[in-house]
Image (cartoon, grey):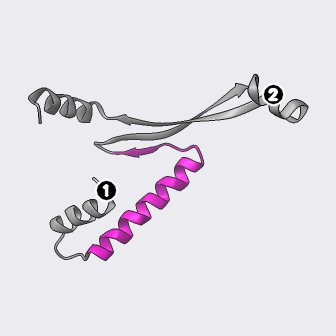
Amino acid sequence: MNHRQVIREVAGRFPDLTQQQIAEVLEMLVEVWRAALAQSDDVVIRDFGRLTVEVQHMRNSGAVLAQMGSSAPERLPRLYFRFYPTSELRDEIEQLMKEGI
């Protein structure tokens, strides 16, 4: 489901709101979530799941050291972007997959 499809779906459920109003709310949500993730805060959406960015500081070695030499930093950050669904969402999706939907 893409951005436009989400807007149309939500607009169908809220006939008093325009698609433009819904798009503005959706864009505001994304802005808030982006800012939180950029600050290493989790985004928890009730009944859906948790979005998080995990940072692992890895020792520098190999090709990076060979290319950068002594100016290479000792450790490099590696980012992992994760989504952890709620157990209810996971169970629902697994059930739908079993039913072949």
Discs 1/2, front: 2
Q: Residues within 10 Å of mark 2 (few under 14, many from 20)?
A: some
Residue lying at 20% horizontally and 28% vertically, measured from the top left: 94
Question: Please, what is the three-letter code of the amino acid marked with disc 1?
Answer: Asn
Residue lying at 82% horizontally and 27% vertically, measured from the top left: 66
Q: Is residue 57 above or below residue 25?
A: above
Between 18 and 64, the one lying in front of the other is 64
Q: Quadrant of residue 75?
A: top right
- Give how far apart the Cα atoms at labels 1 and 2 are: 41 Å
Q: Which image quarter holds the C terminus? A: top left
Cβ atoms at labels 1 and 2 below 8 Å apart? no
Q: Is residue 22 above or below residue 34?
A: below
Q: Residues within 10 Å of mark 1 (few under 14, many from 20)?
A: few
Report x, y in % for residue 42.
Answer: 49, 42
Question: Please, what is the three-letter code of the amino acid marked with disc 2?
Answer: Leu
Q: Which residues are magenta?
A: 19-45
Report x, y in % for residue 5.
Answer: 25, 60
Can residue 44 be seen here? The reply is: yes
- Which element type, helix, strand or loop, lies under badge 2? helix
The disc at residue 90 is none
Q: Is residue 31 magenta?
A: yes
Q: Is residue 85 left or right of residue 53?
A: left
Q: Is residue 82 magenta?
A: no
Question: Which residue in the structure is indicated by mark 2?
Answer: 65
Q: Is residue 86 left or right of residue 62?
A: left
Residue lying at 48% horizontally and 61% vertically, measured from the top left: 31
Question: Which residue in the structure is indicated by mark 1?
Answer: 2
Disc on the earlier residue, 1 or 2? 1
Q: Is residue 7 left or right of residue 92?
A: right
